[in-house]
Image: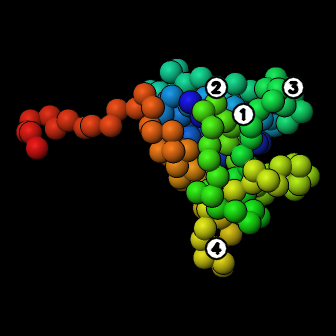
C-alpha cells in the first residue's frame, strides 16, 4: 500500500482525479490544509465520480499535524527541484509520496528537511511542471510496479471476446 499526500491542493478537479486513482490502487489520500476548496465541492466529487465514498481520505490542519499523526513515516517529496528521479529510489510498502500545491509545489523549507527522499519527474527544461493528477499517477504507479502491483488485478477481460 502507498500513501499519497497533497500539501495544500488548490484545484478540486485535480484532487478528485487523484482520489479516484487512489481508490483504484488501494492507496490512502492525505490532504494537508489549507485546501483551495471544500471537501464537499461539486467539482471534487465530479472528478472523483462515484468513487469518492470508497476513498480513504484523511485531513490535517498543517504539515506539523500530518507528521504528528504519522510518526516515523517514510516520505518521498515529489518536486521539480530534486536531483534524483522518481525511478532512482525504492518505495517501501506503506511509504508516503507527497506532492505540493499546483501553483507553488512543496515549500522549500520542507524540501530541505527531506532532500534525500526528494524525487523529480524528468521533463524538458523550459517546462515548469506537469499536471498534479498526472504527476501523482506517474510516481504512484512506479511505486506500485516496484512492489509487484500487490493486490491489483493484472489481467483484463474482454466483454464479448477472448484473446
In which quadrant is the C terminus drawn?
A: top left
Dot 3 alpha-carbon crowd within 10 angstroms: few under 14, some 14 to 19, many 20 or more: few
In which quadrant is the N terminus drawn?
A: top right
Label 4 – label 1 distance at C-alpha: 26 Å
Residue at the image position 64 percent from the left and 61 percent from the top: 85
Residue at the image position 64 percent from the left and 25 percent from the top: 57
- Residue at mark 3: 68
- Furthest-top residue in view? 53
Could you tell me if the residues under marks 2 and 1 are in contact, i.e. CB atoms within 8 Å?
yes
Left or right of 128: which side holds 22?
left
- Residue at mark 4: 127
Tell me which corner region of the image, top left, top right, bottom left or bottom right, holds residue 27: top right
> How many numbered discs, if any?
4
SS for dot 4: loop
SS for dot 2: strand
SS for dot 3: helix
Left or right of 162: which side holds 29?
right
Q: Residue 126, relative to residue 107: is it above or below?
A: below
SS for dot 1: strand
- N-term mark: 1 or 3: 1
- Residue at mark 2: 57
> In this orientation, does residue 3 appear?
no
- Residue at mark 1: 31
Dot 1 alpha-carbon crowd within 10 angstroms: few under 14, some 14 to 19, many 20 or more: many
Label 3 – label 2 distance at C-alpha: 17 Å
- N-term mark: 2 or 4: 2
Q: Nearer the viewer, residue 4 or 142?
A: 142
In the picture, the disc for residue 84 is none
Amino acid at each position: 500500500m502507498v500513501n499519497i499526500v497533497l500539501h495544500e491542493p488548490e484545484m478540486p478537479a485535480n484532487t478528485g482525479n487523484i482520489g479516484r486513482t487512489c481508490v483504484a490502487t488501494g492507496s490512502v489520500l492525505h490532504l494537508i490544509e489549507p485546501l483551495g476548496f471544500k471537501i464537499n465541492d461539486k467539482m471534487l466529487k465530479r472528478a472523483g465520480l462515484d468513487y469518492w465514498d470508497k476513498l480513504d481520505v484523511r485531513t490535517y490542519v498543517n504539515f506539523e499535524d500530518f507528521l504528528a499523526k504519522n510518526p516515523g513515516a517514510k516520505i518521498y517529496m515529489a518536486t521539480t527541484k530534486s536531483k534524483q528521479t522518481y525511478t532512482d529510489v525504492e518505495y517501501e510498502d506503506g511509504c508516503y509520496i507527497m506532492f505540493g500545491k499546483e501553483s507553488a509545489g512543496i515549500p522549500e523549507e520542507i524540501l530541505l528537511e527531506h532532500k534525500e527522499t526528494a524525487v523529480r519527474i524528468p521533463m524538458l527544461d523550459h517546462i515548469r511542471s506537469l499536471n498534479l493528477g498526472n504527476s501523482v499517477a506517474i510516481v504512484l504507479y512506479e511505486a506500485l510496479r516496484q512492489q509487484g502491483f500487490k493486490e491489483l488485478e493484472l489481467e483484463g477481460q474482454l466483454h464479448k471476446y477472448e484473446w
